[in-house]
Amino acid sequence: MKVVICGGVALESQANAQIRQSIKDGWVELIGEENVITTHISGAPNVVAALRPNIVLGIGSYLPETVYFTEVAREAQRCGAATVFWATEDPYEKDASYRIESIFDVIFSCDRWGARFYEHPQTYHLPLAGCGRRHFVPWRAEMERPIDVLFCGVAFSSRQEIVEDIRGNFTGLNVSIIGPGWGRFGAGFSDRRIEKDQLIALYSRAKIILNLGRSLHFDNKRYMIAPSSPGPRTFEAALAGSVQFFHEDTLEMSRYFTAEELPCFSNPSEFGSLLQRFLASDKLRSATAQRAQARARAEHTYMHRARRIIEFLQSKKRA
């Protein structure tokens, strides 16, 4: 089994670059480093022609006009390779999905609800994940965790509304809300950017991680699809041995973690009750973090996602 992984966003963020590398790591773990080649989309047709892989996997964004997947898909078809696209930015770019819908054999969307809006008969949901090599941190009960509540991420309007609602529970706590747009909120808030490589280490210094979805829609005006599936940081933080409180207005998280592994809240009262219980008990935090970590290692790494793609293609006799 040989796989060529290609994408082509020239100015992507460091966070997205690590997701792309983590996807490769998952394939390497599953089928071996010698069988996985990653390449920029501009050189992908030549790579496919030379290697004649079983699978050509396009990943990432399909929004930029400079990212042109047609040529690599044609070359893959010439050599008999299955063509798969994994849309890792759904549903925020959905209006531009026509760029890939007539090109690939199979499309996987990282968002369960967003997958329903593709005009392609072979579209399925495949959530993002964490990387066992990059994100796993062995649990250490003796680790000092001076931060009571931590959140890292851009201050999108939806996140600001949630934090405003629950910040009354922060009185007397060491709270750190970090990311562009938060500085104006005062003490405990910072505009500082945290690089992805630093984030896992920062998680280990916090008792509770806030998990808040984003709402930045680049090209999602046709259907205005509300995001449904958790983003990659959910799985990354679980692998890092963190206790997460997830703000939820659907029951989607229950597909991935139980309430004993990853507690959810939907209003300030629920958040306050959770916070009081968990800050009062080292034992509860330890058990919850270790259960979530075990679940992530068993079901939610990029190796598991790669295996799902192969199993699907084999069931359809495409690989």
Image (cartoon, rainbow, N blue to C red):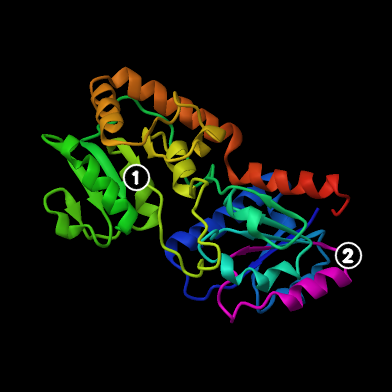
> Start and end of the magenta stretch?
58-82
Q: Residue at x 29, y 21 (%)?
A: 282
Residue under circle 2?
A: 80
Q: Residue at x 74, y 56 (%)?
A: 35
User: Would you say residue 68 sits in the magenta stretch?
Assistant: yes
Could you tell whether 8 is left or right of 69 in the image?
left
Q: Type of residue at label 1?
A: Ala
Could you tell whether 191 is left or right of 36 in the image?
left
Note whether 314 is above or below 279 in the view shown: below
Residue under circle 1?
A: 201
Note whether 122 is above or below 304 in the view shown: below
Residue 166: x and y, percent?
A: 23, 40
Lower position in the chain sequence, tag 1 or tag 2: 2
Q: Is label 2 in a helix, a strand or a loop? A: loop
Note whether 133 is above or below 5 in the view shown: above
Badges 1 and 2: C-beta atoms under 8 Å apart? no
Classify 10 Å Cα crowding around label 1: few (below 14), some (14-19), many (20 and above): few
Q: Is label 1 in a helix, a strand or a loop? A: helix
